[in-house]
Amino acid sequence: MQFFYIALLGAFGCLARYFLSGWFYNLLGKNFPYGTFAVNIIGAYLIGFIMEFSTQSELISPNLRIGLTIGFLGGLTTFSTFSYETLRLLEDSELLIASINIFSSVLTCLFFTWAGIETTRYLL
């Protein structure tokens, strides 16, 4: 059953990444990897929320939790794209933008994971 949840929700996560990142690129431009940055922040918040909620409540089954985190969020977030885009910035001698991408991505995602956990704790 876990494989079903991972596969199904992973497909939805991939589609969500495609549409969300495209929307952010259209909205903000392509001079910074806004799409990847946005989906990774969203995913960081959601994994904090889902993991804390599922460990503090019985409303999310272990199979659904695995499907949501490994499947959906695994399909939504993208470390490989972050790595590729950052490397391209470095190759193009965009050291400042690459550095901003690295530090802002890591720090912002850590913050939003914490925020997701804290949101759950507040709601429960």
Image (cartoon, helix red, strand yellow):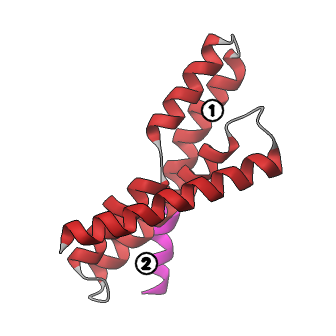
Q: Which residue is drawn at 64% across and 24% down?
A: 98
Q: How many labels does the image show?
A: 2
Local SS, label 1: helix
Q: Which amino acid does label 2 sit on?
A: Arg
Instruction: Tell me which amino acid carries mark 1.
Output: Asn
Helix, strand or loop: magenta stretch: helix
Closest to the observer: 27 or 117?
Answer: 27
State left or right for residue 55 relative to residue 118: left
**65 up-or-down from 18: above or below:** below
Indicate the position of residue 2 as horizontal and vertical percent values. Answer: 20, 70
The answer to whether residue 113 shows anywhere in this view is no
Q: Is residue 87 visible?
A: yes
Q: What number is the disc on residue 79?
A: none
The residue singled out by tag 1 in the image is 101
Residue located 30% across and 83% down the image: 60
Q: For mark 2, does the 10 Å Cα neighbourhood hold few (<14), some (14 to 19), or many (20 or more) residues?
A: few
Residue at the farthest left position: 1
> Could you tell me which secondary element the residue under label 2 belongs to?
helix
Mark linked to residue 121: 2
| Residue pictured at 25% horizontal, 71% vertical | 4
CA gap, disc 1 to disc 2? 30 Å
User: Which stretch appears magenta?
Assistant: 113-124
Residue drawn at (45%, 35%) of the image: 80
